[in-house]
Image (spheres, rainbow, N blue to C red):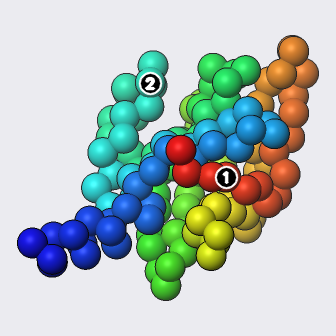
């Protein structure tokens, strides 16, 4: 029983619903099993996760996630496949998560019919 608890705890670091209130965005992730289905984007099948926004129906899809040394390295594409980026997601000592764009496109969401750029580095908390 102890082993199962230990494994579950380890496997929960990158399996979460992450939220950023400032930009009203979230991430649903499961980098261990890659079994997330993006709502209204079922054509992509099961993926490691996605980035969504309360004020925009479009999604940024995590197409690949590799965990290395307490960090996850991600490939993220928009739902049209026209933009992509690489990013790093790490869990901070205070329990928050930081997503940092390493290279590629800037993620954007639409708010009130205008594009809003997501900063290169954004902090989330688990909910």
Q: Position of residue 30 (x, y in %)?
A: 39, 53
Q: Residue at x 63, y 20 (%)?
A: 57
Q: Residue at x 15, y 77 (%)?
A: 2
| Quarter of the N terminus within the rendering | bottom left
Q: Which of the marked residues, 1 or 2, is nearer the chain's N terminus?
A: 2
Specify the quadrant of the image occupied by residue 35: top left
Element type at mark 1: strand
Element type at mark 2: loop
Mark 2 neighbour class, 10 Å CA radius: few under 14, some 14 to 19, many 20 or more? few
Q: Which mark is residue 18?
A: none
Q: Position of residue 36 (x, y in %)?
A: 36, 41
**Residue 10 shows in the view:** yes
3 to the left or right of 47: left
Q: Which residue does the numbered mark 2 point to in the structure image?
A: 39
Q: Residue at x 44, y 65 (%)?
A: 13
Q: Position of residue 104 (x, y in %)?
A: 74, 58
Q: Is residue 67 above or below residue 83?
A: below
Q: CA distance from mark 1 to mark 2?
A: 21 Å
Q: Number of marks in the image?
A: 2
Image marks 1 and 2: residues in contact by CB distance under 8 Å: no
Specify the quadrant of the image occupied by residue 45: top left
- Closer-to-camera residue (21/72): 21
Mark 1 neighbour class, 10 Å CA radius: few under 14, some 14 to 19, many 20 or more? many
- Closer-to-camera residue (82/32): 32
- Closer-to-camera residue (71/107): 71
Q: Residue at x 45, y 50 (%)?
A: 16
Q: Residue furthest top?
A: 113
Front of the two marks 1 and 2:
1
Q: Which residue does the numbered mark 1 point to in the structure image?
A: 124
């Amino acid at each position: 029983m102890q082993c199962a608890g230990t494994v579950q705890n380890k496997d929960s670091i990158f399996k979460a619903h992450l939220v950023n209130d400032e930009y009203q965005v979230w991430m649903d992730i499961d980098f261990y099993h890659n079994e997330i289905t993006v709502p209204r984007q079922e054509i992509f099948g099961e993926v490691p996760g996605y980035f969504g926004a309360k004020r925009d129906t479009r999604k940024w899809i995590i197409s690949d996630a590799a965990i290395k040394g307490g960090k996850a390295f991600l490939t993220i594409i928009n739902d049209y496949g026209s933009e992509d980026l690489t990013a790093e997601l790490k869990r901070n000592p205070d329990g928050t998560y930081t997503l940092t764009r390493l290279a590629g496109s800037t993620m954007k969401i639409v708010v009130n019919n205008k594009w809003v750029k997501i900063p290169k580095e954004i902090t989330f908390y688990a909910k």
